[in-house]
Amino acid sequence: MSERYQTLFTRLRPHRIAVLTNVDDPMWQESCISIIAFLSQQWGGYHSLIIPTDGKTIDITFWKFLSAFDPDAIYFYKRSFKDLKRWVPAEAESRMDTELKKLRAQGHEELEEAEIREQMLKWPADGFSISQDLTQELLDRLSPFHFQDFYNVMPIHMGDTPRYPLTKVADVVPFVQSPDALFVLNDNLPQDRRAPPSLWLFAETGVVSDQLQRDLNEVGVTSVPKYMNTETDGTIIGWGIEPGAKLGPNTAFSFSRLALATVRSRFAHPFAIPSIIVRGDTVKDFCLYYAITRNNGRALWLPQWFIPTGGEFPGSLISAVRKLENMAQSQHCDYFSLLSMSATTAELSDLTALIRQHMSSLSLNIDDGNDPHYLDRMLQYPSKVYIKGNIDRITAHQIVDDKLPGYFESPMPAIFSEIKASNHRWVGEISFAGHPVPRHPELGRILITGPNMQEARAGIDGLAYQFPGALVTGDDIELQMLRFSISLPSSDNIFRIVLKKCGYECVISDKGAFASESTQKFGSLDKIVAALRDAKTQALLKKFMDDSENKEGVHDQGTYLRDNRRYLNFAPMSAILGGVEQAISLIDEWIAHGILYRGFIFKCSRCSNTAWFSVESIAQNFTCQRCGTMQQYKHSNWINSNEPKWEYKLDEIVYQFLHHDGNVGLLTIDALRRQSLGNFIYSPELRIRLESDPKINMEIDICCIMDSRIIIGEAKSNNSLKAHGKKPMQVMAKYEALAKAMKASGIIFSTTEPEWDEPSQKAIDHLRKHNPLLRIYNYRSRDLNLKP
């Protein structure tokens, strides 16, 4: 039975959702307004993503935003005839007339025209849908809440209101501190003035739909018109950049953020992230801007409305950029980045020159918004939203055999004056100090179990579950309390679960066992890799591994015996370590940890066999290991000295660890750990085989969970990935297939050599090129911090 103590961090938050929209939608701005109208009614809806897609694929850029955002649920916007009637009524009437004639021609004369037209408003206006392949990819990569192995991306339509499991804003207002007025933006500008595009304003203020007004009016919130003709152009532009400064907490999106707090990692430095300007008039440009504001909070979208024509003064453009600059200055950021998904480099250069002409001190550069390294830096520490008062509850628990004894009782929102189980729904999130759980669709339902549990998921921030449970009986929240069991498997058991789902069985390999036990002997991963990197201890370990024959007359290089092991006495050890004191200190420490053993080398008087004898195995006599003769050791039995010398033996487990190049794997794991954000665990090397065909097997040198992402890979002591008769490209294909089956996020290839040979480097480059969503790590000796 294994026991340990584990610190748990429990947080509560609203659901995080992403909405997919048709990248080829000719009315994309109107569709995005309808999406924002839906999000404005959802508690926490401001902190959502809108992602463009053709229904089959998603651009790499937006996959990265989705991965960092880590949605609980994914929807797609489905245009209907209702959209056409709202935005292009003439087209709607024409299409409905055509459909009506078809129905009449089919003999449906009994149907009332008004009733038919009302039903037609729900009909799809186009064939946009999410393919099964993309749905599976969303499940595999993001692990949203799902039932068993099934997931379905649900549609939302114009005029829809948030439904189970989401919570409506109007259901939250009566139970938290809330404004009593909702501002309704009213464009009543005279003809000589132009308001910014509606979508540009609504992206930050939200959309006050008729339904939202009715719902809020019913709970005592009054709708107050906010007329534009009484405001300056600069003030109106400010509404779309920092609405809280001008409109206070009275916008639709402000209501969606009631009782919520935005937090960032303690490692995040807002001044280190550029303030971003996105130029363009496509749905991708808008969605890029929208995603940046939700992840980092400091961005500006510049559609054509802001770009002057005919040499006119760029008043609106400069006003918008200055307001972004003011936001940046408050966070001590002085770097601005110009991005676009559609504009040419020449257009961006012209825009940069125009801005600098009026703001010469602004540090503005054109960057590539599709560059994965740029995106990784920007998304390293995304914003997160939690319920105030429930951002972090820290508790310590005993873990017995990878399980929490008894039940864990979920907390409830502390900021609510009263909780109505039928209307109030949220997500609980549990993370484990020093023990990340990887985002994977298989793990949630295994690690959290209990009566009345809904779907659970393993996300990027830990385990997440929905509250209340699957069955709600009345409004009394005490009757809906969730009490569940938590499992927290070791790293190798997590890999066993993941590999079992892929049809593999696995065990820790011999090399993995040697590495694991050697790490325990040294005391920790930090200590063993320090020894492996230190030039002197590295040289000492290499000398113990030296299998060259003894040279006659040379007595300061240790002794190589017939057991194929080298034994060192004090003289060569002190020479290698740089002094007597250093040798004394290391010998005492390593003997205490079972890394070295003291003994003597004796030669048998009967059969002349020379062997090493542990100090524990002798008294005044020794027994020959070859002929079995017991004899007193005399001057004739020891060699090359007048008195027997202490001879030191390297522990056999450590020897096997080094002999099988286990040092390369540990150096690689440590290098990865140092790149992580602090959440890192690893498994010893695993040997896996396909359950349906045991002949298909392989060893995985690197198996780690880095910032809740699975990383696997190969560690080599030479410069070639060639192994067991397989060429580097074949080895690469093997890892590529395994990573996809395991839903791993990355593959690492490491070598202690300065560079890979040409076939291996080509294979790595090929894998990276054809798998842009798979993080490929390529470590050489310099990356492992090994000195040449």
Image (cartoon, grey):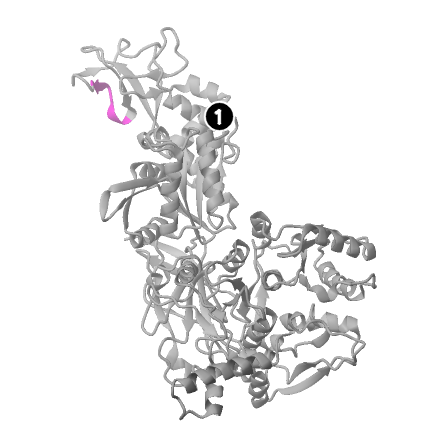
Residue 93, placed above or below residue 14: below
- Residue 530 rendering spot, x and y as whole percentages: 48, 35
The magenta span reads 616-624
Residue 637: quarter of image = top left
Q: Is residue 253 left or right of residue 109?
A: right
613 vs 500, nearest the viewer: 500
50 vs 751, nearest the viewer: 50
- Residue 409 rendering spot, x and y as whole percentages: 39, 71
Task: Tell me the amino acid under the disc marked 1.
Answer: Lys
Secondary structure, mark 1, is: helix
As drawn, the residue found furthest toward the top would be 553
The total of numbered circles placed on residues is 1
- Residue 179 rendering spot, x and y as whole percentages: 64, 82
Q: Is residue 335 visible?
A: no
Residue plotted at (46% across, 45% down): 770
- Residue 552 rendering spot, x and y as whole percentages: 36, 6
Q: Which residue is mark 1?
A: 536
Residue 617: quarter of image = top left
Q: Is residue 598 left or right of residue 189?
A: left
